[in-house]
Image (cartoon, rainbow, N blue to C red):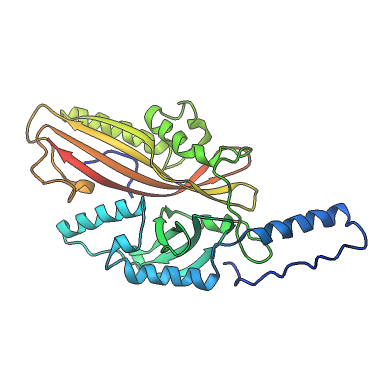
Amino acid sequence: MAAGPESHSPGAAHARTQPHRTAPAALPAAGERGGLRKQLVRGLRTPALTREQAQEVIARYSRDAPRSLASAETDPQLAMDAAALKMRRVTKRRAPSRTFSHTALYVPRMAGYPRWFAADAISGQGKETLRHALLFTQAKAGAPWLLAADPLPTDASLGRVALDPDGYASPVDPGLKGLAITPADLPRAHSALFNGGPKAPGASALGPGPKTDQAYRALVQGEAALKGQGIGLVSRFSPAPGPVFALRTRDRGALVWYAVKQNEAYTTTERGKLAVTGDLVGLAPARSARTRVDTTVLVQYLAAVPPKGRATVTGMYRKAVAAKGS
């Protein structure tokens, strides 16, 4: 019944030795100085964790998540997967596989916390095969590594990520200017697109595709279809709470993880027209919808942002997380 947008490897770490503190015999040339600066930056920013530790984080997630989502995930992933679990309990559907293969790790160098890393991975087999853009975070030293996001890319998006000579990635400041769109502005731009269409202020930063302008048209068509059935739908989008994450790509752009929140209100004057169905199952009593249903939906996105041009949205995970009938 929801009428929103479509539903849904680095090398091992090595310790870097510090240079001797003796004065050089001569000043290095300009090109050499540039190389030294890059080495110093890499030395100040250590990898978020080693390759072996990252593999263990993913293995631990596969082991712990089926038993307790709260011990393996954080928002927005936790809120979305918890809602999906409620739906499966009602519909008796089998849980998706949380065992991953063909994993490629993208561990950024960084200073301080939170720390995070991404992984391109495959789950399932045959028709149930899914590609993942996993993103794990660690809030502070000693805290558990938790899955924060998992938009499902339609292509090998993470293969665009740039790696340094040691096989590590570089994080991009979400507020970085000079790209087709500042990464931190993507949630606002995507919300503007769905609220006002491709010509809305800021929406032009997003390129056409099934998760942008085509999804907007599907939303408008869905609202019109419901209206013909005597059901009104008011849908509003806004940036979801939480940080935006980005990695540098080989074209000097960024691959960005972000989320958008959708608030829907379904109304009718005739009892019996509304029902808690589809993506809303498990979030409210089946008979609670009399003349109004209010819902909250979270949508994760993965977007490739070039230095110039328009961002391409390559991955998505959508799930209603709350519903109230009245």
Viewer can see residue 125: no
Closer to us: 80 or 57: 57
Tell me where residue 130 sits by quadrant: bottom left
318 with respect to 111 (left or right): left
Closer to us: 8 or 88: 88
Position above or below: 205 against 161:
above
Position above or below: 230 against 317:
above
State the residue at coordinates (58%, 52%).
Answer: 171
179 with respect to 219 (left or right): right
Residue 15 in the image, given as x and y percentages of width and height: 65, 71
Position above or below: 225 against 243:
above
Looking at the figure, which quarter contains the N terminus?
top left
State the residue at coordinates (39%, 42%).
Answer: 241
Viewer can see residue 20: yes
- Total labels: the figure holds 0
Residue 159 in the image, given as x and y percentages of width and height: 56, 59
Residue 110 in the image, given as x and y percentages of width and height: 58, 57
Position above or below: 217 against 284:
above
84 with respect to 141 (left or right): left
Residue 322 in the image, given as x and y percentages of width and height: 23, 44
16 with respect to 200 (left or right): right
State the residue at coordinates (27%, 38%).
Answer: 3
Looking at the figure, which quarter contains the C terminus?
top left
